[in-house]
Image (cartoon, rainbow, N blue to C red):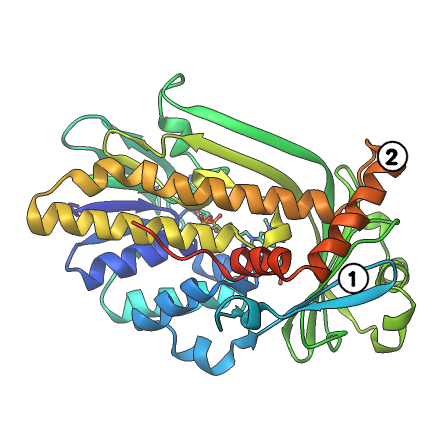
Amino acid sequence: MRTQVAIVGAGPAGLMLSHLLHLRGISSVVVENQSRGHIEQRIRAGVLEQGTVDLLIESGVGDRLRREGLVHHGLELRFGGRGHRIDLSGLAGGRSITVYAQQEVVKDLISARLAAGGDIVFEAQGVSLHDISGPAPRVRYRKDEVAREIECDFIAGCDGFHGICRASIPPGALTAYDHVYPFAWLGILAEAPPVSPELIYCHHDRGFALFALRTPRLSRLYLQCRADEDPASWPEERIWDELRKRLGENGNAALQPGPMLQKGLTGMRSFVVEPMRQGRLFLAGDAAHIVPATGAKGLNLAIADVRVLAIALERHYRHGAPDALERYSDTCLRRVWRVQRFSAWMTSLLHLHEEGGKMRQRLQIAELDYLTRSRAAATAFAENYVGLPFDD
Ligand code: RFL
Ligand code: PHB
């Protein structure tokens, strides 16, 4: 089989890239090792930046998002038992965020690709990359026990943090920046009405908690816990009790428990590789970088990467101009590092840290106090949270 761009991974990055390339008349094949059912049910992100929403709508895959997505103009920061609203839209020039689950974005993209005759290979086994630095790279895999090969001009490594693309780059060609946090999030999806129509980020001396949502009847809740915590040691009652405590007194009345549909642990990590390219292999999304989930940026960063890559590939194919592809890594990394900074800052601001003691906790409260009282500080927060503008 031959295609112009072989894409490894059918997460948001790989699917969106395939869609954006199709709109530019560039062929691609997406190779995914999981089943369609699996990736359409995988619960992950839920917050889309304004730029992500705009891109999904402009590129024709935003109809359901526009109907079902919940537009949020603000959020709450809670500390010292009190809530403080940040008027995101008022501070960030009318921009907003939209709550719409990642697996819904994935479903919308898969159905758009398949409706347009796009090629997505699900349940591909043993995916491997070959000759990534030569003129004719190839992707090999097995499907139904038959060995297959895709010849292509370029490979897009969109296979997430644990994928094989980054690992196919010779050691020494990449510099990795890595920080693993000593805490994690216990994430819960519960059939319970959200405590509030807007997200609540809670700083508490028992640890961080986040009250998010998926729909007006489905809550998405997170509790800071130890990195090696066993989710089995958190029965439902203990979770509701802890959520109640971290939300603080004023919120108690609004917390209405309901059946928990899913429970899992999410590690917290800041990770970047430089450059995001080796020869004809371009890394995008979680394959190249991970942000701690506090800023809600991972999916948005993945979409920002593939937007840059699609534009660069169009310049290559339409105008024979290699400049944008040459700049791909630098262009993406500028945004990646600004988003890393924001995500690490928000993580440090809101979590309970074992090191640093009482002094650190008092400084966190002082910073939260400043953030909620100073229009300048709140504006900087809002500008980052709704998403920095795209730059090329
Ligand atoms: P993905 O989504 O991991 O997709 C990679 C795809 O590659 C496949 N794959 C392979 N395919 C073929 N061969 C192989 N050898 C392969 N190895 C892997 C995988 O099966 C998968 O389908 O990466 P992508 O596309 O870069 O997208 C990144 C996002 O998924 C991720 O950054 C976000 O989910 C992070 N994140 C959040 N991001 C936000 O923007 N807003 C949020 O509110 C938000 N909340 C979150 C999050 C991530 C979380 N978890 C569980 C990590 C909340 C949580 C709890
Ligand atoms: C979510 O809705 O899953 C979510 C929201 C905000 C975050 C992370 C995750 O910072």
Quadrant housing residue 331: top left
**Residue at horizontal 25%, vertical 45%?**
6
Furthest-top residue in this view: 172
> Which element is circle 1 on?
strand
Give the percent coordinates (x, y) of residue 158: 38, 45
- In the image, the residue with mark 1 has its CB under 8 Å from the nearest atom of ligand 2: no
User: Which residue in the structure is indicated by mark 1?
Assistant: 78
Q: Residues within 10 Å of mark 1 (few under 14, many from 20)?
A: many
Q: Looking at this rendering, what residue extends furthest in the bottom direction?
A: 67
Disc 1 residue type (three-letter): Arg
Total tally of numbered discs in the picture: 2
Q: Is residue 107 left or right of residue 119?
A: right
Q: Is mark 2 within 8 Å of ligand 2?
A: no
Asked if residue 130 shows in the view, the reply is yes
Q: What residue sits 82% from the left and 32% below the top?
A: 356
Q: Amino acid at mark 2?
A: Gly
Horizontal and vertical percent for residue 312?
A: 22, 47
Mark 2: few/some/many CA within 10 Å (<14, 14-19, 20+): few
Residue 160 in sight in this render:
no
- Image vertical order of residue 27 relative to residue 178, above or below: below
Say if 168 sits above or below 73 in the image: above
Find disc 2 in the rendering and name its residue. Answer: 357
Residue 376 as seen in the image, left or right of residue 321: right
Q: Which sits earlier in the primary sequence, circle 1 or circle 2?
A: 1
Front position in the image: 34 or 51: 51
Residue 275 point in image, percent of width and height: 36, 30
- Going by the image, does 289 lie left or right of 112? right
Whole-Å distance between the Cαs marked 1 and 2? 20 Å
Residue at disc 2, secondary structure? helix
Q: Quadrant of residue 126?
A: top left
